[in-house]
Image (spheres, grey):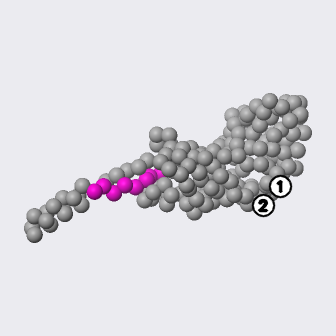
Amino acid sequence: MKILMILLAALSLGAAECRVQSDGALKVKWEAYKTPLKAGVKGSFVGVSSDIPKEATSLNTLLEGRKVFVQLKTVESGLAERDTKLLQFFFNWLEGQTAEATVLSLSGEGKEGIIKIALRLNGKTVEVPLRYAMVENLLEARGVIDLADFGALGALSSINKACYELHEGKTWQDVGIGFTLGVTEVCR
């Protein structure tokens, strides 16, 4: 009996408990499109906060049900003049100063899958699927929204008029959205 107890104790010591940890460095990104050739313009937001914990038992429990808040007036495109135009002729046309995303679910196998979020923008909430992949210790998620779904065609028209020549008369209503978050698996 004593040998059996020692064997069970040794086996339990060898079983590792694994958890996922977030580095808290959540980055929210976007890509808008201009010109008939659909040239991309990328950017991000500086004012991002969330209730994502530092540690959980799995990626699902780390993210599901969590909220992300984006301060729209903190847009950054890499060009101060463009940021000013985006604020004046797009974001100021939207209702509210914050976009809110709630993670509804994660599905997939291994290191990639789909994250479904409920995105609230301009007073409207729309379910949006994002494809995600784990690349080393970085979770990358990307999807596309249609500004018409959020009642934001007036804001789109405003930025198109302000940048008509530069955009060659075409500003697209689909916008790429996504986020990155450092995530590591730790086994003890």
Q: Which residues are magenta?
A: 15-23
Q: Position of residue 1 (x, y in %)?
A: 10, 69
Image point (41%, 49%), residue name: 185
Relative horizontal placement of residue 186, taking residue 116 as reference (left or right): left
Q: Is residue 8 left or right of residue 160?
A: left
Q: Residue at x 62, y 56 (%)?
A: 116
Q: Amino acid at mark 2?
A: Gly
Left or right relative to 85: residue 70 = left
Is label 2 in contact with label 1 (beta carbons under 8 Å)? Answer: yes
Of labels 2 and 1, earlier in sequence is: 2
- Asked if 72 appears above or below 163 in the picture, the reply is below
For residue 123, which numbered disc appears in the image? 2
Mark 1 secondary-structure assignment = loop
Residue depicted at 10% across the width and 64% down the height? 3
User: Is 115 or 24 nearer to us in this picture?
Assistant: 115
The circle drawn on residue 102 is none
The amino acid at mark 1 is: Gly
Residue at figure coordinates x 77%, y 37% from the top left: 33
Under tag 2, what secondary structure?
A: loop
Judge left or right: residue 20 versus residue 171. Answer: left
Q: Which residue is mark 1?
A: 151
Q: Residues within 10 Å of mark 1 (few under 14, many from 20)?
A: some
Residue 24 image point, x, y percent: 51, 50
